[in-house]
Amino acid sequence: MAIATSLIFFFVILSASLHLHTNTVQAQQRRQSNVTLGSALTPTTNSSWLSVSGLYAFGFYPEGNGYAIGVFLTGISEMTVVWTANRDNAPVPSNATLVLNSDGRLVLQQPQSQDTDITNVTQPASYASMLDSGNFVLYNYVHNIIWQSFDHPTDTILPSQILLAGQELISRASETDYSTGIFSLSMQRDGNLVQYPVSAPTPTYQYAYWASGTSMYGDNCSLHLDGDGHLYMLNATGTTNIKNLSYAEPTKEEKIYRMTIDVDGIFRVYSLRRTLDPKEKWSIWWNSSSDKCDPKGLCGFNGFCISNDTDADCRCLPGFASVNPSSWASGCVRDFTAESCKIKNGDGNTKYYKMSPLENTQWEDDSYSVLQLSSRKECEDACLQDCNCEAALYKDQQCKKQRLPLRFGRTLLSDSNVAFIKVGESFVGPSSLYSKDLILLCT
Ligand SMILES: *[C@@H]1O[C@H](CO)[C@@H](O)[C@H](O)[C@H]1NC(C)=O
Ligand SMILES: *[C@@H]1O[C@H](CO)[C@@H](O)[C@H](O)[C@H]1NC(C)=O
Ligand SMILES: *[C@@H]1O[C@H](CO)[C@@H](O)[C@H](O)[C@H]1NC(C)=O
Ligand SMILES: *[C@@H]1O[C@H](CO)[C@@H](O)[C@H](O)[C@H]1NC(C)=O
Ligand SMILES: *[C@@H]1O[C@H](CO)[C@@H](O)[C@H](O)[C@H]1NC(C)=O
Ligand SMILES: *[C@@H]1O[C@H](CO)[C@@H](O)[C@H](O)[C@H]1NC(C)=O
Ligand SMILES: *[C@@H]1O[C@H](CO)[C@@H](O)[C@H](O)[C@H]1NC(C)=O
Ligand SMILES: *[C@@H]1O[C@H](CO)[C@@H](O)[C@H](O)[C@H]1NC(C)=O
Ligand SMILES: *[C@@H]1O[C@H](CO)[C@@H](O)[C@H](O)[C@H]1NC(C)=O
């Protein structure tokens, strides 16, 4: 069924695109639809095997200060990788070689090291093929598929590719780093398509930040993308559409589509016009959310997300500083350059704290104690006087004491609440504004 669909798509694209991409093929790439045993690629010459139309290539692409192996589009300047082999392996240097060897294994060879398998097969391959659907396939001697990149998606699915129950897509680490990132899109066995932060201990409902709401359909539901941008889910028999995510794009232009879970944790259907212009750019046809603060964990520990109409931004809790300003997800730690530390150094073991309020934010509720208190001030004091309390969330007369780190933080303007964060405060003498709040903490 899946093979039939992909074959039909293959021929549609094949006939449609043959004439379009003839000119865009780079000299270093070989147009070779069937890759025979003994064929080899190197990062700098003969670096990839092209599909018949030249739309997709399998082979080396630049990553970091070396090369990675995967499937990518040719003919556009915007580098678009749709599949990566061994995505968490380090980039390889230019003296590496990729070989479909005489044993029928596709291996990466590097000087003075063991061969690395690129595909995991139980029988030898007779030949390989980069199909025009974007699927890279290994066949045995009776022409059966023994391995295909479509069965091992990384962060993208293409038309005719199916995300089956039990499979997931995981975002890349950054726009230029294709290794495993921090967000997933999981086709669960209960029929629900759900997004989680990868760090969630066991993916359970409380960590989800997006769900299709189709859990009543049970096992073996699947996610599909059609060649017209239609993203939808089918039930176990593959006969009934249970959910439309995006609709087919009503367009007369020739376009190609992909669905990717992006670095920011949102998944989007993109379209690209088929022209000869290498400057052509992908445009968003559909997105899972327009609120860029939805993905949980975007701002890391002790950070919270602020969004305006177009962008998301991360801030740290009061008294905290960003671990790595170029990577929000690395979160925030106590700002030890704060005045309080200098005082501490000059003053033996004595530490002074106060509570710093933060209005209208939402966090994961992982409280170790919940008190019924009638005022903000009581909640503030309850945390201040509890050596185990590092923060308190106060809403509707409930005071929830927390330990750090706080996570999944975001602003929530529609909600009236306050978070109190215990911060160090410089001791400025008995007449200080804060002196009434100062307490001696257990050390
Ligand atoms: C690739 O090999 C298969 C099986 O031998 C053959 O049917 C097909 O025509 C070949 N494709 C091309 C483009 O040569
Ligand atoms: C690329 O591969 C082709 C076909 O195998 C071969 O003839 C050619 O010499 C190779 N080019 C380089 C630079 O290795
Ligand atoms: C291969 O390249 C790496 C990195 O540039 C280098 O360290 C290594 O010595 C090279 N090996 C050979 C055999 O040239
Ligand atoms: C290869 O496939 C076998 C059987 O499907 C599986 O048990 C094994 O974990 C796989 N190995 C890798 C490296 O994916
Ligand atoms: C799901 O697929 C598996 C493997 O094909 C099958 O054993 C199982 O019965 C299916 N479950 C449902 C609910 O169709
Ligand atoms: C899928 O939907 C069809 C039509 O509603 C139904 O007949 C079939 O039983 C469903 N299959 C499963 C496994 O739910
Ligand atoms: C999804 O859209 C198709 C038309 O494109 C329609 O036939 C189908 O019933 C829709 N499915 C649902 C669950 O609404
Ligand atoms: C994202 O989807 C929302 C609907 O969920 C839509 O309002 C918004 O315009 C979309 N944004 C983009 C950039 O497509
Ligand atoms: C949204 O925030 C981003 C980053 O903070 C900023 O560059 C952009 O100008 C803001 N856009 C609007 C419409 O306020």
Image (cartoon, rainbow, N blue to C red):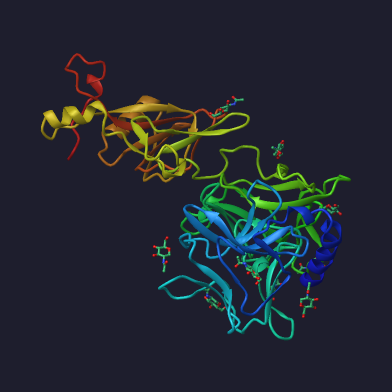
- Above or below residue 394? Residue 212 is below
Q: From the top left corner, tell me how far across and down residue 2 is, in percent.
A: 77, 70
Q: Quadrant of residue 393?
A: top left
Tell me what residue is drawn at x 65 percent, y 68 percent.
Answer: 151
Give left or right: position of 284 versus 435.
right
Q: From the top left corner, tell me how far across and down residue 371 is, in percent.
A: 38, 37
Instruction: Say whether residue 212 is visible.
Output: no
Q: Quadrant of residue 149?
A: bottom right
The residue nearer to you, when weighing 353 against 90, is 90
Q: From the top left corner, tell me how far across and down residue 82 is, in percent.
A: 64, 57
Tell me what residue is drawn at x 35 percent, y 42 percent.
Answer: 404
Report how many numbered discs are placed on residues in the image.
Answer: 0
The residue nearer to you, when weighing 47 against 352, is 47
- Outermost residue, top side: 431
Q: Quadrant of the N terminus?
A: bottom right
Instruction: Say whether residue 9 is visible.
Output: yes
Tell me what residue is drawn at x 46 percent, y 44 percent.
Answer: 329
Q: From the top left corner, tell me how far across and down residue 295 is, in percent.
A: 56, 44
Give left or right: position of 248 versus 45.
right
Q: Quadrant of the C terminus?
A: top left
Tell me what residue is drawn at x 44 percent, y 43 percent.
Answer: 300
